[in-house]
């Protein structure tokens, strides 16, 4: 009992964030991955204003929470989320993740890389003990958390359930158009919803800032993901349940801390992974989460249909030219790498090859499998750590260990797939993130060295002179591996498996009705994706000559999604562009003064691309390439106007009286056509 | 020779959604080669019944036997392989594919020819036999001219025909058609009825047809079942059933 | 213009004698879904307090017209006037507030809100806080089945009940124009009776109604004027008597046999085309064409026929 009580204020931190997450979902229809980032921004600015600008706490609070936070939310709504139709849940998810990755990366760029320490408190003095309950001291932080949580919970429940505005918000979440037919200004209602929810984020950020000695985005991110778990148990619907579960999680945490031996390696693993276990349990046990995020907007058919693929429409001569171009480029690349490219850049390109393999795993699971997976870096890490451990303890060559590691990663992916059989969309994404976090907090640190530093690759682990800095052996290895993987992906895609997967992306119901075993196909593609990711992980290990948990953490998993969504998630070209783009841009950024936040800028750049995802689900880069290709086509072959788009009958096909479920944009290898207005003669 | 029994035997099937009984102790049979219409108001349970037969839903009670196989407990894809073809109330085509690709994947799925190792050895291209089968079905349904069009460029009427062709390529013994004329205009409905009648004549396939367009039902089916509020309220020939007072009251509206 | 209940035939107007006031005027409207054009220069009108049928084959653009009229889809050219007021380009909620109601095709209710919440949402918005309790009572009186299901989520209602819910909103707070989009789709004939009855009552209270339908016989009974669309253009605009002939012309122009297709339309044609036993084509559920009903039956604009698109 003595352990339980202090758990309550701690649990209230989870509760407050969980309630805000539920509110955001209920009021805006978006599962706000960026909540932590928004909280961090307000906390950061607040601390900056108070400490650097010596503003009064009250004024700083007003600026950072009451003004800045809602303003940020309104910007997100107006320029990002409003462009996404209600039914496109993948785009909402991707945009949220992009904000999650982009915002913390942006701050050091704007404000320089100085960290903030010892953030001030706004309500009660955190160190004062105000009174005691059953012998437990209640200090300022606990008091303020509990009080604010209670007030917020009450206020929000009243808002959503009892006020007309709350009703309008819930209606707008289901269908912005339908609610307009009732005379409601849906734009304004949704904007207010975003403002309120962002205000909550800012409030949470500033309130919880004194908990951390050093203000870091990661702490907020972890807190938010833990709050996901509580929100998940509430099926993202009931704020009181979210609050209660959050508090219970806090209590469980402190109770466990009390009972488990502090020095045990398992106890720290268990504690850090507790929220993720709760999240996984929710995803497995709560039936309401299976359909999470499946939008049911009855007026979805009014949105213009996604443009058809033009791959079939590309002139075969152009196809041939492009293919020949790729072969020439490949040959030139190989020759250059073996001859004149300087060492620095050779390393960069080698890393590019490794990352390309990892990105190919995303092509498999997201492009072909149609499922958003947020744990690919984790799977690469499984491959890498397995190989490293085998080399370390059994003296196995990394090359052999790499194969074992790839199989291990494949198995982990298979387990994940089997656990998520009933989950789709948002639920599946949460499951993969939970898995990534679990490995980050409980597994990888155990497999690293005792003090958590990276394991370095010893030369006896790899033969063939792969570590020789003056040779090109690694390049050859990586090139061969990449080519094999590329061929594998292409063959699978054009083969029966690829076609079954395309059918499943189009309509799971119809695919099952044809006799396609959905379970087997899902498990298969997850497994293949895991294997490829594992291979990439081992390659990276050899290339970087070390393996560490940081190199495969969950933020990287999310960043990978942001990157590949920009370059094109369903094509092999997209994966290679992503792999090379990632490392080349990072290298180029080293030539900038470090004031520009160093590495973070690469994520910001890709984030800008990812923001266009809603209108260009095939990837903004892919879109530009297609446009360029078509221009060339017209120029070279003098083919007339761009191929005509579908006639007016299309509007009937998708809109005719049936409320056809608008296709989920991510699951198509969609390429945009230059909008061709077809006039009837 | 012993009577092989009906092709499809639905016996005492009930489906309850959280307190609402969608389907209540429904019993009927479909003989091989027979076409049966299933009509009734919205909410009568027709699509729910279809979903129970196909496997998307598990009924609480009852049994469904197809050609001697108990369907309950079997997953959807296995039921499809037993010989059930289906079209859906909301057309479920694969937006990325052309019409031909739809039929090819349906053919492959039925024959279970797909193997990963075959893919990797590049031995998965469509064979001439497959193409021939697909062409035959395209002709039969009357969409051979649209064979290579991407399905996203076709209107709703053509999409419904594509769905039908896709269901047929698997040579099902039983076709479940769920409101295939919904959203189609008079001419397209006409086309569809023609195709269904032709299929019955040429293939001897059993058809279970859910429809609101009673004109179409009357001209296509041998027998009609009327459902209301989850239960069967009449069975018989189309004319008999439409004259049944219970049906007139519940469905048609009492008329002079 | 108010959205109050004016009695049929007693519209006050400052228009010159001989001209009929128009609830809705659609002029030279074109519209697209993204890059795909759906409407080409559509012009027609709905008389105040009247009922106009909008018919045509699949993909003709009927639903597109409804969406443009109520603002769900922007037009690319042309204008729309509601009771003389230009509403072109206004967002949907402003058009709704100006006095329109739209029962969209498919599910037109909020599945995640209860029946009562669905009603409260619109009553509070259109009528203000004080009118809500009374409005709820009137809604449940008009459609008792809604009262029984008031705490059920909209998504659990049957298709017919959902249409009734949409109609209840309109019946209680009548607008000047109701757009009903394929309101009888998928409904049992007995339920269609109830729904059309509701439309009639709404019209009798003074609301002009534009009914979009695929099944033509019932709607032509109900409506005074009719507009036939074909491939996104107007093929006919005039009294509903002449609509069937126009449809016939359209089918002929398309190369289809109107006799064959129309036999599915007109129950009077019991014999059916040659070679088909009449028993299979008879539609015993139709109520016969017992003369035109509906208030606000207009003397209409002179019959005008525009050749098909």
Image (cartoon, coloured by chain):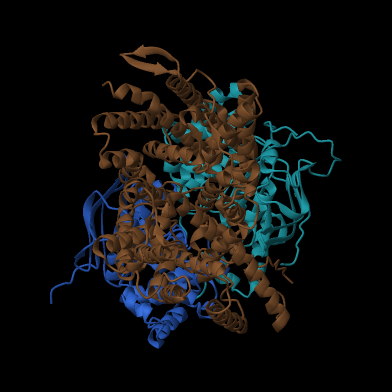
Q: How many marks?
A: 0
Q: Quadrant of the C terminus of chain A?
A: bottom right
Q: Nearer the viewer, residue A479 or A316?
A: A479
Residue A661, visible in the rendered structure: no
Chain C colour as displayed: cyan
Residue A513 coordinates in the image, percent (x, y): 35, 65
- In the image, residue A452 sits, relative to residue A40, either above or below, namely below
Find residue C39 and report its horizontal and vertical position in percent: 70, 60
Quarter of the image for residue C102 reads top right
Q: Is residue C233 visible?
A: yes
**In the figure, B176 relative to B204: above or below?**
above
The tint chain B carries is blue
Residue name at image x 68 percent, y 31 percent: C4
Farthest residue toward the right? C16
- Is residue A545 placed above or below A316 in the rendered structure? above
* Name of the residue lying farthest toward the top: A131
Which residue is more in the foreground, A526 or C245?
A526
List x then y, in percent, for residue A347. 51, 67
Left/right placement of residue B179 relative to residue C71 reads left
Question: In the rendering, what colour is chain A?
Answer: brown
Q: Position of residue A199 (x, y in %)?
A: 57, 31
- In the displayed structure, B247 sits above or below A524; it is above
Quadrant location of residue C131? top right
């Amino acid at each position: 009992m003595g352990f339980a009580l202090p758990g309550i204020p701690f649990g209230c931190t989870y509760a407050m964030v969980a309630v805000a997450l539920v509110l955001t979902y209920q009021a805006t229809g978006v599962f706000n991955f960026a909540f932590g980032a928004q909280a961090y921004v307000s906390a950061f600015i607040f601390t900056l204003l108070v400490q650097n600008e010596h503003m009064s706490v009250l004024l700083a609070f007003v600026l950072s929470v009451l003004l800045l936070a809602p303003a940020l939310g309104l910007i997100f709504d107006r320029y990002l989320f409003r462009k996404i139709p209600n039914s496109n849940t993948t785009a909402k998810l991707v945009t949220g993740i992009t904000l999650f990755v982009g915002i913390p990366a942006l701050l050091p760029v704007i404000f320089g890389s100085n960290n903030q320490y010892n953030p001030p408190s706004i309500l009660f003095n955190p160190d004062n003990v105000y009174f005691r309950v059953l012998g437990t001291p209640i200090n300022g932080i606990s008091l303020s958390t509990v009080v604010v949580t209670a007030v917020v919970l009450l206020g929000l429940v009243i808002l959503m359930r009892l006020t007309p505005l709350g009703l309008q918000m819930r209606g707008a979440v289901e269908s912005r158009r339908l609610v307009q037919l009732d005379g409601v200004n849906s734009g304004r209602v949704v904007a207010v919803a975003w403002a309120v929810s962002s205000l909550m984020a800012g409030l949470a950020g500033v309130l919880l800032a004194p908990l951390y000695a050093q203000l870091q985005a990661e702490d907020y991110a972890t807190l938010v993901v833990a709050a996901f778990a509580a929100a998940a148990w509430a099926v993202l619907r009931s704020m009181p349940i979210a609050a209660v579960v959050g508090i219970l999680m806090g209590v469980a945490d402190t109770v466990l801390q009390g009972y488990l031996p502090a020095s045990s390696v398992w106890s720290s693993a268990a504690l850090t992974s507790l929220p993720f276990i709760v999240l996984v349990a929710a995803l497995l046990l709560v039936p309401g989460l299976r359909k999470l995020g499946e939008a049911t907007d009855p007026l979805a058919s009014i949105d213009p249909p996604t443009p058809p693929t033009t791959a079939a429409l590309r002139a075969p001569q152009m196809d041939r030219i492009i293919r020949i171009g790729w072969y020439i480029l490949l040959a030139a690349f190989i020759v250059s790498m073996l001859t004149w490219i300087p060492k620095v850049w050779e390393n960069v390109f080698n890393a590019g090859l490794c990352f390309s393999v990892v990105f190919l795993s995303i092509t498999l699971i997201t492009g072909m499998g149609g499922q958003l997976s947020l744990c690919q870096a984790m799977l690469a890490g499984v491959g890498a750590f397995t190989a490293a451990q085998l080399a370390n303890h059994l003296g196995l060559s990394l090359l052999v260990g790499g194969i074992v590691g790839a199989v291990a990663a494949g198995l982990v992916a298979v387990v994940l797939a089997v656990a998520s059989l009933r989950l789709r969309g948002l639920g599946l994404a949460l499951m993969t993130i939970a898995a990534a976090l679990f490995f980050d907090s409980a597994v990888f640190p155990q497999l690293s060295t005792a003090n958590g530093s990276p394991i370095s690759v010893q030369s006896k682990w790899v033969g063939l002179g792969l570590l020789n800095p003056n040779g090109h052996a690694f390049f050859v290895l990586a090139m061969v591996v990449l080519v094999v993987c590329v061929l594998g992906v292409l063959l699978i895609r054009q083969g029966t498996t690829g076609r079954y997967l395309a059918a499943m992306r189009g309509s799971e119901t119809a695919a099952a009705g044809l006799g396609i075993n959905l379970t087997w196909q899902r498990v298969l593609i997850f497994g293949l994706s895991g294997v490829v990711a594992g291979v990439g992980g081992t390659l990276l290990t050899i290339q970087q000559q070390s393996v560490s948990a940081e190199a495969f953490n969950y933020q990287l998993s999310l960043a990978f999604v942001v990157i590949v969504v920009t370059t094109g998630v369903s094509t092999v070209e997209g994966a290679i562009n992503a792999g090379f783009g990632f490392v080349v841009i990072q290298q180029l950024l080293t030539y900038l003064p470090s004031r520009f936040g160093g590495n973070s800028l690469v994520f910001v750049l890709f984030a800008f691309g990812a923001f266009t995802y809603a209108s260009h689900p095939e990837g903004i880069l892919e879109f530009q390439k297609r446009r360029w290709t078509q221009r060339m086509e017209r120029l070279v072959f003098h083919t007339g106007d761009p191929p005509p788009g579908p006639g007016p009958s299309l509007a009937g096909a998708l809109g005719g009286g049936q409320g056809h479920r608008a296709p989920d944009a991510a699951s198509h290898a969609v390429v945009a056509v230059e909008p061709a207005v077809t006039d009837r003669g | 020779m012993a009577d092989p029994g009906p092709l499809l035997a639905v016996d005492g099937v009930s489906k309850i959604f959280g307190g609402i009984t969608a389907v209540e102790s429904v019993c009927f049979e479909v003989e091989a080669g027979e076409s049966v219409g299933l009509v009734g108001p919205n909410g009568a349970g027709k699509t729910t019944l279809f979903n129970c037969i196909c496997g998307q839903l598990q009924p609480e009670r009852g049994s469904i036997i197809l050609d001697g196989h108990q369907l309950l407990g079997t997953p959807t894809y296995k039921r499809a392989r037993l010989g059930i073809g289906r079209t859906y109330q909301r057309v479920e085509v694969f937006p990325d594919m052309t019409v031909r690709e739809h039929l090819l994947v349906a053919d492959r799925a039925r024959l279970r020819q797909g193997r990963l190792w075959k893919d990797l050895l590049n031995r998965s291209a469509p064979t001439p036999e497959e193409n021939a089968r697909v062409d035959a079905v395209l002709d039969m349904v009357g969409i051979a001219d649209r064979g290579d069009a991407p399905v996203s460029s076709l209107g709703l009427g053509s999409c419904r025909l594509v769905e039908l062709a896709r269901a047929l390529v698997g040579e099902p013994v039983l076709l479940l058609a769920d409101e295939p004329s919904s959203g189609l205009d008079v001419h397209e409905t006409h086309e569809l009825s023609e195709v269904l009648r032709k299929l019955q004549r040429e293939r001897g396939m059993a058809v279970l047809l859910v429809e609101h367009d009673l004109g179409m039902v009357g001209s296509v089916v041998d027998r009609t079942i009327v459902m209301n509020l989850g239960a069967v309220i009449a069975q018989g020939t189309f004319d008999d059933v439409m004259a049944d007072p219970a049906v007139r009251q519940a469905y048609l509206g009492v008329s002079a | 213009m108010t959205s109050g209940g004016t009695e049929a035939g007693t519209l006050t107007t400052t228009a010159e004698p001989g001209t009929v006031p128009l609830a809705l005027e659609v002029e030279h409207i074109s519209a697209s879904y993204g890059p795909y054009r759906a409407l080409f220069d559509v012009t027609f009108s709905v008389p105040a307090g009247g009922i106009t049928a909008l018919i045509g084959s699949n993909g003709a653009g009927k639903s597109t017209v409804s969406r443009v009229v109520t603002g769900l889809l922007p037009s690319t050219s042309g204008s729309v006037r509601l009771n003389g007021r230009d509403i072109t380009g206004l967002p949907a909620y402003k058009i709704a507030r100006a006095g329109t109601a739209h029962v969209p095709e498919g599910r037109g209710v909020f599945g995640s809100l209860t029946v009562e919440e669905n009603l409260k949402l619109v009553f509070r918005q259109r009528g203000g806080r004080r009118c809500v309790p009374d409005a709820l009572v009137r809604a449940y009186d008009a459609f008792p089945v809604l009262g029984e299901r008031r705490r059920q989520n909209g998504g659990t209602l049957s298709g017919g009940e959902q249409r009734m819910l949409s109609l209840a909103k309109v019946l209680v707070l009548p607008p000047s124009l109701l757009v009903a989009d394929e309101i009888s789709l998928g409904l049992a004939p007995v339920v269609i009776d109830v729904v059309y009855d509701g439309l009639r009552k709404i019209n009798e209270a003074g609301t002009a109604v534009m009914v979009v339908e695929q099944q033509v016989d019932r709607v032509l009974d109900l409506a005074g004027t009719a507009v036939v669309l074909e491939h996104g253009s107007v093929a006919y605009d005039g009294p509903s008597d002449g609509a069937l002939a126009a449809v016939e012309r359209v089918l002929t122009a398309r190369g289809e046999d109107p006799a064959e297709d129309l036999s599915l339309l007109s129950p009077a044609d019991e014999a059916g085309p040659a070679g088909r036993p009449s028993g299979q084509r008879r539609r015993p559920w139709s109520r016969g064409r017992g003369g035109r009903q509906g208030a606000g039956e207009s003397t209409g604009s002179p019959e005008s026929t525009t050749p098909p698109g």
